[in-house]
């Protein structure tokens, strides 16, 4: 496989794959900035590199052995990279919020998209919150889901900053398409605090009518365990909160009027494994671990298919 984008996300992903003896090998690291830290690290670790972008990748002898390409550039750059690679017989895992291919949140829907030529990993906020919305939606109709993701400004490179509009739109859409909410809204905060703060995520779900709070809590805790299997630093920061709005005390929503049901609030923290940036950058891990886990599952699926 190859990685395009030698910034925060691409470098963290490369380090994760190199540390592991799983089915993936890094055949090339592709950037556009010859002096980037990511390309320098790749060179030091024996990974073939090019600083000539996707054209450089196409010209590398190693490209002949590449079956899968991760894109960790920016949403606009991914559109151009996909245009250059879509007819080359490779699969692409998109870590930008360009959302060309179907959304993938591994614990919720990876099995539905194992053959997708281009798989979109949503966003760091989406990877952290969509599983929670999907867990709540098992018990009832989530008429509205709203999430707020807060990441350290230091961990958001220029590629992230060039993709903020796409972050908001892609995350909100994934809350609906993958999470199952009727409406979704996403907010991102780039927190400039120094020392940097850990990634935090707040999830609000409005669930219609009478619902079983214990069942919702059990499903959320189960989902957190399943995400922890590939992101060990993903955890509940406080107990799950429930607030009931009944006919006597409804919640008035500006867009839809009276809401009767339960508001579920889930507060999450994500500590990173500090493979590249320090542990505050759980936002790198939640994305790169999800992408790596998806690629490994796809590789196993392809091997099994080749045998049959
Ligand atoms: N930082 C995060 O927390 C985070 C989390 C999840 C997803 N993302 C997404 O990952 C992407 C990268 O984010 P980042 O924070 O690592 O940004 P970054 O700026 O640190 O990294 C992007 C890298 O891509 C390179 N690049 C840009 N255009 C290129 C092109 N056409 N070909 C090859 N390389 C190119 C840049 O030189 C840079 O090294 C963004 O789309 C962002 O939305 C970021």
Image (spheres, rainbow, N blue to C red):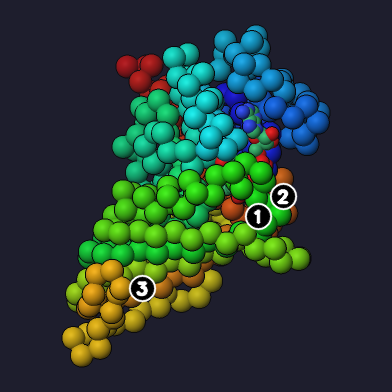
Image location of residue 65, percent across then percent down: 57, 13
Q: Residue 283 location, x and y as percent? A: 59, 53
Q: Residue at x 39, y 41 (%)?
A: 103
**Quarter in which the N terminus is drawn:** top right
Q: Is residue 96 above or below residue 204?
A: above
Question: Which percent across, then down, holds residue 181?
Answer: 29, 58
Front position in the image: 286 or 6: 6
Res 21 quadrant in image: top right
Q: Which type of secondary structure does the marked residue at label 2 adopt?
A: loop
Task: Pick whichever of labels 2 and 3 is earlier in the sequence.
Answer: 3
Quick check: marks 2 and 3 in contact, CB under 8 Å?
A: no
Where in the image, quadrant-wise, is ligand 1 located? top right
Query: Label 1: which residue?
Result: 281
Residues packed near mark 2 inside 10 Å, few (<14), some (14 to 19) or many (20 plus): some
Q: Quadrant of residue 242?
A: bottom left
Q: Are marks 3 and 1 in contact (CB under 8 Å)?
A: no
Outermost residue to the bottom = 248
In three-dimensional space, the C-alpha distance between marks 3 and 1, rounded to whole angstroms, equals 26 Å
Q: CA distance from mark 2 to mark 3?
A: 32 Å
**Residue beneath label 2, please?**
277
Of the pair 67 and 175, the residue shown nearer to us: 175
Which residue was labeled with disc 3?
Answer: 264
Secondary structure under tag 1 reads loop
Farthest front residue in view: 254
Could you tell me if the residues under marks 1 and 2 are in contact, i.e. CB atoms within 8 Å?
A: yes
Mark 1 residue CB less than 8 A from any atom of ligand 1? yes
Q: Which corner quadrant of the image does residue 81 belong to?
A: top right
């Amino acid at each position: 496989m190859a990685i395009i984008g030698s910034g925060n996300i691409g470098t963290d992903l490369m380090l994760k794959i190199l540390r592991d003896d799983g089915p993936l090998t890094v055949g090339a690291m592709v950037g556009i900035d010859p002096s980037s830290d990511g390309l320098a690290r790749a060179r030091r670790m024996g990974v073939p590199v090019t600083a000539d972008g996707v054209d450089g990748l196409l010209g590398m002898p190693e490209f002949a052995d590449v079956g899968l390409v991760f894109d960790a550039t920016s949403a606009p750059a991914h559109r151009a990279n996909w245009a250059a690679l879509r007819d080359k017989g490779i699969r692409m895992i998109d870590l930008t919020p360009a959302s060309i291919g179907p959304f993938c949140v591994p614990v919720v829907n990876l099995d539905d998209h194992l053959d997708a030529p281009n798989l979109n990993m949503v966003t760091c906020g989406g990877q952290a919150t969509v599983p929670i919305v999907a867990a709540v939606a098992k018990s009832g109709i989530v008429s509205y889901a709203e999430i707020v993701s807060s990441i350290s400004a230091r961990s958001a490179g220029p590629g992230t900053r060039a993709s903020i509009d796409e972050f908001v739109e892609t995350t909100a859409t994934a809350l609906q398409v993958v999470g199952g909410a009727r409406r979704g809204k996403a907010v991102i905060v780039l927190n400039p605090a120094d020392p940097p703060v850990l990634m935090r995520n707040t999830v609000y779900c409005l669930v219609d009518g009478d619902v079983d709070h214990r069942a919702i809590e059990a499903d959320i805790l189960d989902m957190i365990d399943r995400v922890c299997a590939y992101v060990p630093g993903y955890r509940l920061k406080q107990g799950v909160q429930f607030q009931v709005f009944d006919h006597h005390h409804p919640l008035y929503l500006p867009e839809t009027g009276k809401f009767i049901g339960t508001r579920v609030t889930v507060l999450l923290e994500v500590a990173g494994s500090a493979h590249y940036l320090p542990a505050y950058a759980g936002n790198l891990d939640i994305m790169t671990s999800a992408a790596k886990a998806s690629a490994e599952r796809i590789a196993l699926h392809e091997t099994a298919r080749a045998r049959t």
